[in-house]
Every structure is written in C-alpha cells, then in structure tokens.
Amino acid sequence: MSFTIHATDGAARRGTLTTPHGEIRTPAFMPVGTCATVKGMTPESVRGLGADIILGNTYHLMLRPGAERVSALGGLHKFMNWPHPILTDSGGFQVMSLAGLRKMDETGVTFQSHIDGSKHHLTPERSIEIQHLLGTDITMAFDECTPFPASHEVAKRSMELSMRWAERSADAFKKLKRYPPLTLPPKGREATANAGAEGVDHLLFGIVQGSTYEDLRSDSINALTSIGFDGYAIGGLAVGEGQAEMFRVLNFTTPNMPEAAPRYLMGVGKPDDILGAVERGVDMFDCVIPTRSGRLARAYTSRGEVNIKNARHRDDPRPLDENCDCPVCTNYSRAYLHHLFKADEMLGPILMSWHNLHYYQNLMQTIRSAIAENTLADTSATLRDNWEKGDLTAL
C-alpha cells in the first residue's frame, strides 16, 4: 500500500503517502502552483517552509505552455525545479466555471480559452493524458464540479456523469505506462524522504460528488470503490455552502469512504475549515487562500486574521505574529509591511504569502503531532480559543 496510517485520534488520522517523488506526511496542506509556480515563491522556499507536495493545474498548463512542451522538457518536476511530489487537478473545476465559454456533453467539455479564445475539447481521456505528460505523482479523475445550490435531480445527473467519466479516467490511466524520468533530490537531506521512490507507482484519485445529499454521496462512493482508486477526493464543497453545511456533508461522507486510502478535500480552506475537516477524517487539502490572501495584505496568525493595510499598523514595530518564527516575523515589523503595501511594492505580497504558507505548514505539523500524541481535542480547543481572541490591540 502507498498509504500508511501511523496514528488516529477520534476520526483524525496521521499517516504517510508514498509517491514516486517522495513521501507526504498527512494531514497535509498542498500549496497551489497553478501555472507551475506558487505565486511569489521560489520552489526552494516553499520546500523550506515544510511543504511535501504542491498542486498544479491541468487547465492552465494545457493552455500555456502546453503539456506536450512540458513533457519534451522533462516533465513538470524538472520544468519548475520541484523534485518532490506533485498532484494535478483534472481541469474540470476550471472548465466548468467558464460558464458561457463552454459546452458539455457525454464525451466531455468543449470550451474557449480565456487567454486567446481558442477552442479545446477536454475529455476524461485527454485530461489523464495531459496529467501523464506532465508526469504528475497523483492524477485526478475528470469530473463535473456540481454547482451550489443544486436540486437533487440536477445533483444526481451531475454525479452520475462524473462517475461515468471516472470509469473512463481509470481506463485511460491504466493504458498509460511511460512517465518522464524521475527528478529526485540529491543524496543527503532529502534521501530519507525519497527512499524507495523509484519503485513506487503513480497514483490515481477518484472524486466523490453528490452536492449536499447523503444518498448521492453514498452512491458516488460505491461507484468509485467498485472501479478502484488509489485515493478518494471529496469534490463539490467549498463552493458557497458555508462551513456548517460543509461539515454536515463531511459527517456522513468520510465515514463511508475507504479507510485504507487517503481522503482529499478539494479547495479547502481557511485554518478552521482544515482543522474541522481533519477532525472528520480528511487527510489532504489544497487552497489558494494563503497566497491570494497574502497578495491582498491579509495574514493568518495565531490570533486570527490581520489586514496589514489598516492604519493601526502604521507605527507598530511588532511582528505579524509574536508566536511565529518564520523569516517574515523574525525580520520585519508590521509597520514595514504596512509601508510596502501602501507603496505598492512587490515585496509586500511576497512576504505576506511567505508568512501565510509558513503558518499553514506549521498548523499541519501541530495537527500531526497532536494526533500522534492523542491530544487533538485539547490542541483544537487552544487553537480556536486563540483565533477567537482576535488580533493584538493597537499600541
């Protein structure tokens, strides 16, 4: 098995997922590298903050620079200088969000590029082929992300289409054997994390759909497990339903998912969303929030969210988070960060993104340690209490 569970605490699990390019400690947060880059960050700095894996975007990479070009250049790992695990989404979410620029049928989705208006036809087979050309460690089945809200009838029709596409994705994945050569890190610091990676298979994850309906989620899980996947994602959440509804859906979804396989909640989320999902048995997460918020001058700290553009920070010599040891909090004041954004300097978004990614990776390590020590309930209460206190008072 590529996934090993080392400890549990209630429904929460701490484990290790092994891929061709190394191991992933779970629960894991995957920074989003949409266009073969985590915005504002070098791959080395992302790795240095503790990330085991990043996410790449099939839709964007197929349009620019093109999957065939990336493959010819040695695959996505070599192309972006990230010799560690990569998960690529299927492109379904982005294509479905194009609204007036796409048309869907049983075969797949025909859409116009948001870049130049060129037409493309994305099918389950082509999605898998693109991800194969990129050389990704974890490939996602092609699906339709059901919009919210959706009636039971609409959600059922959407889910059933996704399940037919899932079977076609699995068939296409089995037919593709060759991948770009592995670009593993040099011997030394990374050697242990990548031990045995050469003999590890690439992985395929199916995606559970069904909107907010328990019977549809159950039917989707049954359909996917009958096909057989290496891991199972939960799609169609974090699309506007709110945290309470998301947790309600997780309450009846994750207990029915295969226990021995990793569970991935797509597109989530804020720190409290992640913590609540871990408590409900989820192992993997991705979201643009750390870097997007960083570009918008918003930081996540042990005392909740901070908007560094607020005038109250103008003369504040304190760090963003006095409990954080990241390079930003160690070396720069709130006053300086406030100045960078007011002066429209590019260093501001870079430093804020850097801090946020550090905060997220530190949060995941805190959660993993708590599960191992069987103290997750106490750790969760402490984290939430501190978030509720809000930011420090102004000087």
Image (cartoon, rainbow, N blue to C red):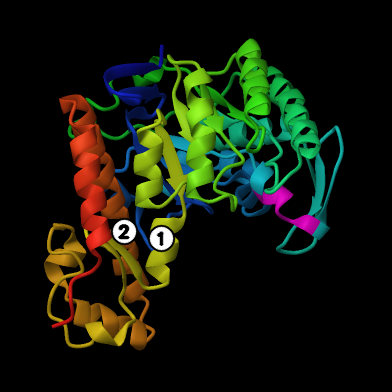
Secondary structure of the residue carrying numbered label 1: helix
The image shows residue 340 at horizontal and vertical percentages of 30, 82
Q: Is residue 17 visible?
A: yes
The image shows residue 312 at horizontal and vertical percentages of 25, 85
**Quarter of the image holding residue 210?**
top right
Give the number of the disc on residue 356: 2
> What residue span does the magenta drawing correspond to?
94-99
Q: Is residue 385 left or right of residue 297?
A: left
Give the number of the disc on residue 291: 1
The image shows residue 91 at horizontal and vertical percentages of 65, 43
222 relative to 338, above or below? above
The image shows residue 389 at horizontal and vertical percentages of 22, 62
Give the number of the disc on residue 310: none
| Alpha-carbon span between mark 1 and mark 2 | 7 Å
The crowding category of the residue bearing disc 1, from other C-alpha atoms within 10 Å (few below 14, some 14 to 19, many at least 20), is: many
Q: Nearer the viewer, residue 332 or 160?
A: 160
Q: Is residue 180 visible?
A: no
Residue at 18% across, 62% down: 327
Q: Is residue 249 left or right of residue 280?
A: right
Check if residue 95 falls in the magenta segment: yes
Look at label 1 and name its amino acid.
Thr
Check if residue 246 falls in the magenta segment: no
Quadrant of the image containing the C terminus: bottom left
Please report contact status of discs 1 and 2: CB closer than 8 Å, yes or no.
yes
Look at label 2 and name its amino acid.
Asn
Q: Nearer the viewer, residue 8 or 191?
A: 8
Residue at 21% across, 56% down: 386
Secondary structure of the residue carrying numbered label 2: helix
Residue at 34% across, 16% down: 4
